[in-house]
Amino acid sequence: MEFSESFLQELADRNDIVDVVSGYVRLTKRSGANLFGLCPFHSEKTPSFSVLPDKQIYHCFGCGKGGSVISFIMEIENLPFPDAVAFLARRAGMALPEEGDPGQRRQRDRLLDLNREAARFFYATLTGPGGGSGRDYVLRRRLSGNMVRSFGLGFAPDSFFALTRAMEEKGYRPDELVRAGLANANSSGKGVHDVFRSRLMFPVIDVRGNVIGFSGRIVGEGEPKYLNSRETPVFNKSRNLFGLNLAKKSKNGYILLTEGNIDVVSLHQAGFDSAVASLGTSLTPEQARLISRYTGEVVIAYDNDTAGQKAAQRAIGILDKLNLKVRVLQMQGAKDPDEFIQARGTAAFRALIEGSENHVEYRLRAALGERDLSSDEQKVAWLKEAAEIIAVQSSPVEREIYAMRVAERAGVDKAVVLEEVNRTRSRSRFHQQKREERDITRQLRQSAQPRERSLRYENYRSALAEEGVIRLMVLDPPLLEGVALEPEDFSSPMLGRLYGILKEKAARRDMTLSIAALSGTFSPEEIDHITAILQKPEALANGRRALRDYINIIQQEKHSRAEAEALAALTRRSGNKEGNGG
């Protein structure tokens, strides 16, 4: 759907960027008129994400993301442009204009409707005559009818065409079923067949209540045990968590992170309503950032096996980067939360949570493992690994306490452990400083280039001058009056387009530049770069001289390009003549 500039500007005006961003990011640090916080788009411990209330834009100096409130919602909610506009319109109580072709938004809505109908079909199958084996599995896992209803559990019958035929009867096309990840094309190339068969079905519901995909657990023999929807226009498993639509309402104060869907349902049934699970993958940074929107504390309750322990170690590293408080459960005598609750009961599991280790204690104990501390060699190895774990803790108090515990366990003096910790910290700081110096050098070399490779400048010198012209147009539009400069003079097509838009606005005496209004014209990557351009300093004290210098450079480079193209054409003609024996 196309939206007018005036509508997009009103949408941005009625959705203050500070209010919107504050729903996802803690903006606590001020620098002049700007607000800073930890970037929600990449992992960092030092805030580099800036919100500029006066310009109603944001920009991250770490990852380069930037733009308007519309760009922010597109990125944070993983929505295409029309859906982000609709999201903000609902927030502001604005009606969407009924104009243009809905296009991508209509397709997305159609897929969401199809998923909802599929979920209803699976639920009806589980509770109907054809769902016997699914109901038997539910009974074996001791899941109540209330949980079946709360999570919308269903059953995919052992049929290649049950779902596809039911959905086609409701008016959905085979290609839509394939696009939604519910069907595969037949090998003959004609017709489609069901993806999910003989499985207990778990609808994946996002935090807005949309059914975006499915996870199916085999109820008999066969592999894979769990089958998740493939990536679709509405489903990305690395950016969603099973059960978060319910867990976000919990009053527990923490998110209980598990590995399996059954664990989530079982935990909710036992009263632990903050349980969620990743979808067939280890925890991803995107899922961790999603969790951080709703809590400051995570309790990891992964399976009590080698794979679960490795996954817990990886999750700790990801969650710790977001400054989340992390604890880890240790389930003795059970492989997962569901088995523990079935064997020991709810009270025992609650006591397990209350007595859970923080992630430092967990990692120290995991590092110790089966090592024999009576062996000097193994004791030294553990002390070195323990020092590395302790050294990354930012609080000196925490470092001293953990050093004392390690020293007591190993039978050495605390001062020895602290000395190793400090040596490790110094070594780490040295390497970090070297990495930062390399990064700064690389950034200085690339600072004028867009991060997106497809937008890279072919003429570095001209593009810098083109950026300067655009900044001057935004800061002091009257400077450009009477200037003989056209979009075709620009070496960068993107900057030429932007200049053309600004020139048209100036001709209409419209001197405002709204990043939000540009969101429908430029791609998210282009908006990122335009925002970065506008963040660069530009002195107006000598604006006319700077403009004259910029234009001279642009025209010189254009002339050089024309000469190079003419020479290349002449060379090609000469080569053709020689080849023809001329």
Image (spheres, helix red, strand yellow):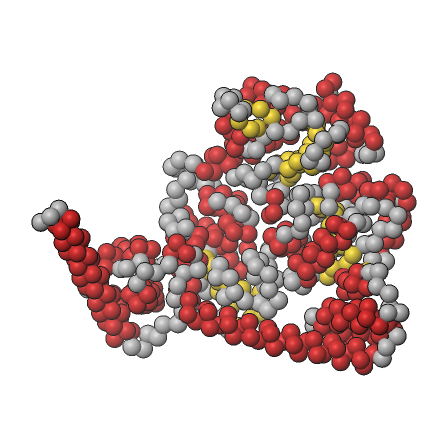
**Image quarter of the N terminus:** top left
Q: Position of residue 351 (x, y in %)?
A: 88, 53
Question: Where residue 493 sits in the image (x, y, percent)?
Answer: 31, 55
Kindly give the residue lying farthest to the left in the view shown: 582
Label tally? 0
Residue 451, percent from left and from top:
44, 60
Quarter of the image where one finds residue 565: bottom left
Quadrant in which residue 271 is drawn: top right
Is 77 displayed left or right of 456 in the figure? right
Q: What residue is drawn where x is 57% and y is 75%?
A: 433
| Residue 269 image point, x, y percent | 80, 40
Residue extending farthest to the front is 581
Residue occupying the point 31% across, 58% down: 492
At a point 38% along the width and 56% down the height, the residue shown is: 455
Q: Quadrant of residue 515?
A: bottom left
Q: Is 324 placed above or below 265 here?
A: below
Which of the two residues, 566 or 554, is positioned nearer the viewer here? 566
* Residue 490 vs residue 548, the one in the foreground: 490
Left-right relation of 349 to 46: right
Whether residue 413 is situated above or below residue 78 in the rendered picture: below
Q: Residue at x 79, y 43 (%)?
A: 267
Do we see residue 236 in this rendering?
Answer: yes
Res 485 visible: no
